[in-house]
Amino acid sequence: MTSEKEKILQQVVEEIWNTGNVELVDKFYVPNFVNHDPVNPNVKTLEQFREWVLFNHKVFPDFHVTIEDIIAQDNKILLG
């Protein structure tokens, strides 16, 4: 991972998803955040997103996200 976007994405995964540090959500997500995850269509606001992250950590205490592949082009990043 070499691009700045890839480094930011890795930081989001490590610091928010893998540690549950929702205090960093405002640092990485825009105020008009829109969730497009079909699994959780009721997560619409940043506050609901924070609650969702914390819920995952409560229900799955060993929750961990691993990035296998990242493709960054223009202003888009695809994860695999």
Image: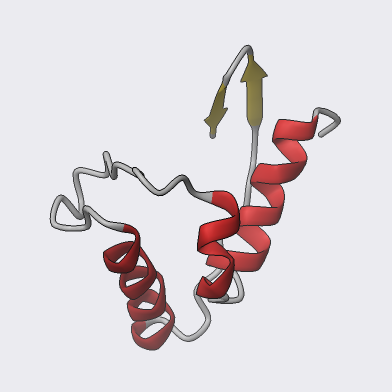
Identify the coloring: secondary structure
Which residue extends farthest right?
2
Question: How far across and down, in percent of the image, does residue 11 sit?
Answer: 70, 54
Whole-percent x, y for residue 10 in the image? 70, 49
Which residue occupies 53% across, 76% down?
Answer: 20
Q: Is 52 placed above or below 6 here? A: below
Taking depth in this image into account, of 28 and 41 the one nearest to the observer is 28
Give the tally of numbered discs.
0
In the picture provided, is 71 more to the left or to the right than 29?
right
> Which residue is the extreme one toward the left?
42
* Residue 23 relative to residue 40: left or right: right
| x 26%, y 56%: residue | 45
Q: Quadrant of residue 37?
A: top left
- Residue 27 drawn at (x, y percent): 60, 56
37, 29: nearer the viewer? 29
Name the quarter where the N terminus is drawn.
top right
